[in-house]
Image: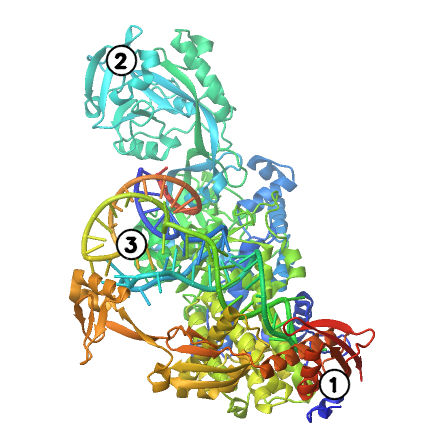
Amino acid sequence: MAEPQTTIPTRRRRPAMTYPKVTTDSADGHAVPSSPRFPEIEERILAYWAEDDTFRASVEQRDAGANGENEFVFYDGPPFANGLPHYGHLLTGYVKDIVPRYQTMRGKRVERRFGWDTHGLPAELEAMRLNGIKTTDEIVEMGIDKFNDACRASVLKYTGEWRDYVTRQARWVDFDNDYRTMNPEFMESVLWAFKGLHDKGLVYEGFRVLPYCWNDETPLSNHELRMDDDVYKMRQDPAVTVGFKITTPGELQGTRLLIWTTTPWTLPSNLAVMVGSDIDYVAVDHDGTSVLLAQARLASYSRELGDEPTITWRGKGEDLLGLTYAPPFSYFADHENAFRVVAADEAVTTTDGTGLVHSAGAFGEVDKEVTDREGIEPVMPVGKDGRFTHPVEDYAGMLVFDANLHIIDHLKAATRGEQGEAAGAVTPGTVLLRRETYDHSYPHCWRCREPLIYKGVSSWFVEVTAFKQRMMELNQDIRWTPEHIKDGQFGKWLENARDWSITRNRFWGSPVPVWKSDDPAYPRLDVYGSFAEIERDFGRLPRNAAGEPDLHRPWVDDLTRPNPDDPRTPEQGQSTMRRVTDVLDVWFDSGSMSFGQVHYPFENAEWFEQHFPADFIVEYIGQTRGWFYTLHILATALFDKPAFSSCISHGIVLGSDGNKMSKSLRNYPDVSEVFDRDGADAMRWFLMASPILRGGNLVVTEQGIRDAVRQVMIPLWNTWYFFALYANAEQYEASVGRAESLGSDDPLDRYLLAKTRQYVEQLTAELDAYAIADACETTRTFIDVLTNWYVRRSRERFWEGKPEAFETLAAVLDVVCRAVSPLLPLVTEEIWRGLTGGRSVHLADWPDATTLPADDSLVAAMDQVREVCSSTSALRKAARLRNRLPLAGLTVVVDDPAALQPFAAIIADEVNVKSVRFLAADSEEARGYGVEQKLTVNARAAGPRLGKDVQLAIKGSKSGDWSVAEDGTVTAGGLALVEGEYGLETHVGEAADGAATAMLPGGGFLVLDTVVTAELAEEGVARDLVRAVQQLRRDSGLDVTDRIELTISGSPAVLAAARAHEALIAGETLATSYDVTEAGSPGGTPVQVGDGETATLALERA
RNA sequence: GGGCCUAUAGCUCAGACGGUUAGAGCACCACACUGAUAAUGUGGGGGUCAGAGGUUCAAGUCCUCUUAGGCCCA
């Protein structure tokens, strides 16, 4: 019978637990679970936060400071809530949570208000769909008030779900005090901004050709055009080659100018023909007449014109300028200045078509530019619904795409010489040379997917071109992540910035605050920038049906007044000031959020001036032409500052197959399922540790999310579980937060504390630089050291109940929980509160690295120790010496043995050797191990001096053609090297019998004694027995602290080992009764031990 | 057609200033270790650094061209 170890009695009772001090777990016992179900813990923490109002406390316990200087300013890019959140929203949501949480812990006050984008076409389209209407006329018929009520309802439809998702992802943001772009206060600020721009002369009304959706009856801005990848789709259109008859007297009179177009419907609006001045043109005979086209295009018309047509005229484009021709259709036959050949050198190419381009003023951007220059008024026989109107009576009421075929039929008939109804309004002499079908990439509306047309519309513009230079300058002050966005995607976009069309002929939006006289004879234009100005002039505010001030249509449209500049009386027909009926582009709202959210300048003027620009914003990279851009425009124009000083523009979240996420393909894990199965912290870690925050794209996989749990969350949790288990067993309560908790003398403790200090320093620097992915990697590496080195090597000391071990681990857990809490807010909350009993880790301060002991040389030494252990393991493996077999000794030869000396016991234990010796590399004994020197040439140093010859020296060092002379001169490959140009390393030679040697990565080497004596073998068997008994205890369901009665039988070697090492085996396995018998006990468990020996074990709880 | 970015192990990515044996995590195989761990350790397989040319004593790294992909613009 062995005596139990002396420390055992204190653990026999199951004492009241010290840890967790508090937990949200309501289950019996409240023990720290060894295998936690994270999603359940998360739900409990979220409930606790809700009840405790922790978020509000975290904001309010930080002082704003004088003039808000202690505030960190974060702008929330407002989402549109008529759909559910997806991974992209979650991703930005996590960043929008991490940065403010971190800054709060750093002591800053960080207000976080949620914002909603509410206006715009998506809401209108949804309202139209719900009400089964398709046109703007039907909206007017329905009543703009009713329609806008429907829009208002649709944009708020999913706010509840949004709040649920955002709350579940553990993002702290104020939903109750949110801002909405449709609130009167926000809209008043938008009006102020418009007026501000107008006062600076940066707003003008113009007629511009824009991509236009005839289905939604609205023009699109250029940044709306490219909303997504599906905007450009292949489409088949008829392409026609048409000849216009030249009317200018001279040799070319009667020749047909051949033009080519894929939009035959624009031909009735033709106003000019464009040529390139330097392009070579020819006229060739064709069917008794002649046609004119670019020489380079002749070959592609060989079918109609023959392989070698007779050329009757040659010339440059400039020779053609000014020629007149008969318009192809007669609708605008008398149009002033029209039907001439004009130059458009940059627009006309000879890569396709005929080298002559027909221009229909208002239906193309270049067309408009050219006709403006030529003094030709554009014509617009197409209505807002995309259908022809007066004077194009032949196709009136017809959608332009549908009119194509009729137009072609008429051209055909005219070409045959027919007239009257068959040829429509086609003028005699106009010929259709070719009709083909053309496949091309064509833009479609990003909302309704109908093909767009280009169409001239009246619109108001912000004259971005007037201050884009300043925008580019201010962009230099913004810190972009990734860096190349600044002068790349964003900078280039700024360089090419065009004036911003900010008005929409729609209903649900902020009103254009411009009132105009309805009689051009008495012109007047008023711009309003506040409710007060409106009330001043109109005698009242715009009020909705409920009587509340409301700037939406139709209420704001009701405000009219007599034109003060019109001296006539109402009876004489005095003109009236009426509002321009347009609403503002919804992007104007989002660009206004910085001041709009606080109703600047009507309220919070001081606050705003101290909180602009924002310290930080984040959105996906596409916002370089969206929100980032509109914020920057308005900030530059109104305040001459950037709107934000740091910006992360992250990449795109892809589905598990690497394609865009698609609901129909189901190629991504369901968000709710991930929350339920893996939890919000796991998803947060997965997204934040990924390359997506460095601008790369990210493939979302379930495996990736689970890896986050495995690599980080479980190791962290298990460290806590380990601590709680032994602290409870010892009834030890650590003094977290007090200086003495950092005072351990134990080398492992001191190492961990110093390592923790380095970790906190590095993490702080990374989070300060918004390098969130780097912070994750740093944390992962640190937690690995914590759990797989410190805890594993310290198990014995915890088992022994060493106070300084508890103190150290508790202190480090406290620091780590605080440091990791922005990255894993839920799990760290449960651990930290369990450890400290405190209210919330998120109310704690960011750990101060300087309070932790600094000891870089200790950290370096321990890292070397880990290398020694690692290399020794490799030696064992190579020599087939299992780890449980003790070996006599290990000799460690390094430059500075004294540095490693304190860790001799750690190494001996880790690699299971009886003794560890340290030798200086230059000692006599070390040289006895058959060491040899190796020379390496430092090419970086020697290269510049030796030039080409450095290669000879390198070759010599490798082949052994080198030497060290008596005076220390080193020669390699016949070349003398000077100090610094070479390195001499000591390498260990072949080991003698009974030893194995290995080099250390950082220099030095190991000699492992591989001689297995009978005693060592016997102890190895004893260790195997311990291991087997422990496994059996576990399999039998015994508790760690249960005592057992143990019986061992087996082969003579087993019996000998069991008897010789009774104290070891009984002690390790908590055996209060210990029997070694030759006869195997019935019901015993056979196990393999040692080198093929069999033992039989039997145990019972004592 | 132009601009920006990317191309490195089966997968995801690191690789200051050019320096001669290109790394990590995951995955795979084998062995070891394990009464905190859902782990861990050791070893192994696995690479034309997209291709071609150039600069250089020396190129994954710098230059040119090509190819492929992404984003942006026309």
Q: Is residue A786 above or below residue A959?
A: below
The Cα–Cα distance between marks 2 and 3, rounded to whole angstroms, is 48 Å
Q: Say how the picture is coloured.
A: rainbow
Residue A963 x %, y %: 22, 72
Q: Quadrant for the N terminus of chain A, please.
A: bottom right
**In the foreground, A932 or A1027:** A932
Residue A344 seen in render: yes
Q: Is residue A942 above or below residue B69?
A: below
Q: How many marks?
A: 3
Q: Is residue A635 above or below residue A62?
A: above
Question: What amino acid does circle 2 point to?
Answer: Thr
**Callout 3 and callout 1 share a chain:** yes
Residue tagged 1 = A1071
* Chain on which label 3 sits: A
Q: Residues within 10 Å of mark 1 (few under 14, many from 20)?
A: many
Q: Where on the picture, by quarter, is residue B56?
A: bottom left
Q: Secondary structure at mark 3?
A: helix
Residue tagged 2 = A255
Residue A1068 x %, y %: 68, 84
The label shown at residue A469 is: 3
Q: Residue at x 48, y 17 (%)?
A: A406
Q: Secondary structure at mark 1?
A: strand
Front: mark 3 or 1: 1
Horizontally, residue A810 falls left or right of residue A977, namely: right
Q: Residues within 10 Å of mark 2 (few under 14, many from 20)?
A: many
